[in-house]
Image (cartoon, rainbow, N blue to C red):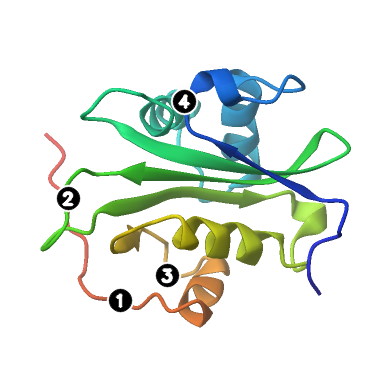
Amino acid sequence: MPPSLETCLHVIRNPREIPHWTDHGRIAGFFHETMRPWNDALPDVSKGLDHALSTTDDRSGFVLLAAHAEELSGGLAMLDTGLGGFVPKYLLLFVAVRPDLRGQGIGKTLVQQALSMCDGAVKLHVEYDNPAKHLYERLGFSTKYAEMRYLP
């Protein structure tokens, strides 16, 4: 089922475009809380939003917010890596939908809108047991590499 016609999508490219009914801290908290148990620490979510909404040459991206009656129902944060080629140009950093609204097409709408705004390849990280993995596969994402990390 598609999202309600009353659901509005807000495109935010810098902090000045954040709607009057919310703020950076509330958006970070929304991502942090609604992405459980696959969430990142709140300070890391906040840093990701700072990067997505930066206007400097080396950091940029955008945030999409889905809202109904000035209440967040979903959100997405996309980073522009500034690369391209062997590393995808974009990193889909966060996608979150309120638990009581999942399965209504909000996440799909957010991802499709974000992809339409990107002029290059997009990558994302998803845990194998995250149900959202199936949505990403239906939208055309595929597994290319196993991610490995060294944490000093």
Closer to the camera: disc 4 or disc 2? 4
Report whether 120 appears left or right of 93.
left
Whether pointer 1 and pointer 3 mark residues with C-beta atoms closer than 8 Å, the reply is no
Whether pointer 1 and pointer 4 mark residues with C-beta atoms closer than 8 Å, the reply is no
Q: Give the distance between the C-alpha atoms of the residues marked 1 and 4, in whole angstroms.
A: 27 Å
Give the number of the disc on residue 143: 1
Closer to the camera: disc 1 or disc 2? 1
Q: Which residue is mark 2?
A: 149
Report whether 58 appears left or right of 102.
left
At which x and y percent is residue 103?
A: 75, 68
Q: Give the distance between the C-alpha atoms of the residues marked 1 and 2, in whole angstroms.
A: 17 Å
Q: Residues within 10 Å of mark 3 (few under 14, many from 20)?
A: few
Looking at marks 3 and 2 on the same chain, the residue that comes earlier in the sequence is marked by: 3
Query: 57 or 152, which is in the foreground?
Result: 57
Give the number of the disc on residue 128: 3
Looking at marks 4 and 2 on the same chain, the residue that comes earlier in the sequence is marked by: 4
Query: 92 or 18, which is in the foreground?
Result: 18
Q: Amino acid at mark 2?
A: Arg
Q: Give the distance between the C-alpha atoms of the residues marked 4 and 2, in whole angstroms.
A: 22 Å
Circle 1: element type = loop
> Which image quarter is the N terminus in?
bottom right
Q: Residues within 10 Å of mark 4 (few under 14, many from 20)?
A: many
Q: Which residue is mark 4?
A: 46
- The image quarter containing residue 56 is top left
Closer to the camera: disc 3 or disc 4? 4
